[in-house]
Amino acid sequence: MENKFTSFLVLLLCFVINLVNSEYYHSESIVSMAPHNSVAHLHFYYFDIHTGNNPSAIVVAQANQTTLSPTFGNVYAIDNPLREGPEETSKIIGNAQGLYVSSSQNKDDVTLTMYVDYAFTYGEFDGSSISIISRNPVKEHTRELTVVGGRGKFRMAVGFAEIRTHFLNVTTGDGIIEYNVTLFYY
Ligand SMILES: *[C@@H]1O[C@H](CO)[C@@H](O)[C@H](O)[C@H]1NC(C)=O
Ligand SMILES: *[C@@H]1O[C@H](CO)[C@@H](O)[C@H](O)[C@H]1NC(C)=O
Ligand SMILES: *[C@@H]1O[C@H](CO)[C@@H](O)[C@H](O)[C@H]1NC(C)=O
């Protein structure tokens, strides 16, 4: 009796797995062997400055052809300061170094796909950094970026950043972006 019941359960399970496998996704609850045991919330402002004598974001490559979107294909290198507040005089707490590429062909959309390491140089997380690889549809009011890892205290971290444009000069591209980062780490 018990055996029959077990067989029935196994069959049912196979059937369910089959159903689920026909989609491109599958998710289930797992018991994690090594759950993250710390969570950090970071709040700072990212200064993306293209103008002046000392721009922190510069174009390093662009397409030699006209496309629907005038910026599609532009690659930018950045060394952007991270500050505590949105004022230019606010304390620098780190810097964001890396690349982003204008990745949407749609002229009504501006998406930057970001490959950036955000390092902290002050306070509790001085010497640690987080890595973001994510698309950033800049016209949306609030965007979510993926944190894929980190260094130092953020070794093996995962998380996400919610970001919002605090200031943007559409002529120059200069922007100040507010970040709220949630990180799970060990
Ligand atoms: C860039 O495009 C122009 C106009 O089509 C062409 O004359 C030139 O050779 C191209 N340069 C490169 C490096 O492809
Ligand atoms: C960040 O969090 C603060 C406090 O909860 C909130 O006031 C602010 O609107 C948030 N900003 C973003 C970009 O999520
Ligand atoms: C944007 O930048 C241009 C060029 O520097 C400047 O003339 C204009 O006043 C700026 N606009 C804002 C809103 O800061």
Image (spheres, helix red, strand yellow):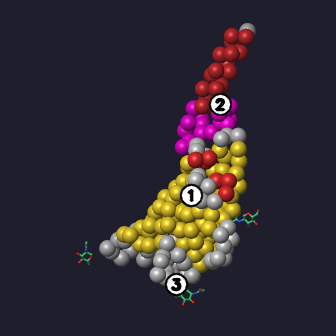
Of residues 50 and 27, the one drawn nearer to the viewer in this rendering: 50
Does residue 95 show up magenta in the picture?
no
Label ID, residue 171 = 3
Percent from the top left, x then y, of residue 113? 50, 62
Indicate which disc, 1 or 3, sits on the residue closer to the N terminus: 1
| Few, some or many residues within 10 Å of mark 1 (<14, 14–19, 20+) | many
Instruction: State yes or no: Cβ of the residue under disc 3 lies below 8 Å from any atom of ligand 3.
Output: yes
Measure the C-alpha gap from mark 1 to mark 3: 29 Å
| Few, some or many residues within 10 Å of mark 3 (<14, 14–19, 20+) | few
Relative to 157, residue 176 above or below: below
Q: Which residues are magenta?
A: 18-35
Name the secondary structure under disc 2: loop
Q: Which residue is mark 1?
A: 119
Label ID, residue 33 = 2
Q: Quadrant of residue 186?
A: top right
Relative to 112, residue 125 above or below: above
Q: Quadrant of ligand 3?
A: bottom right
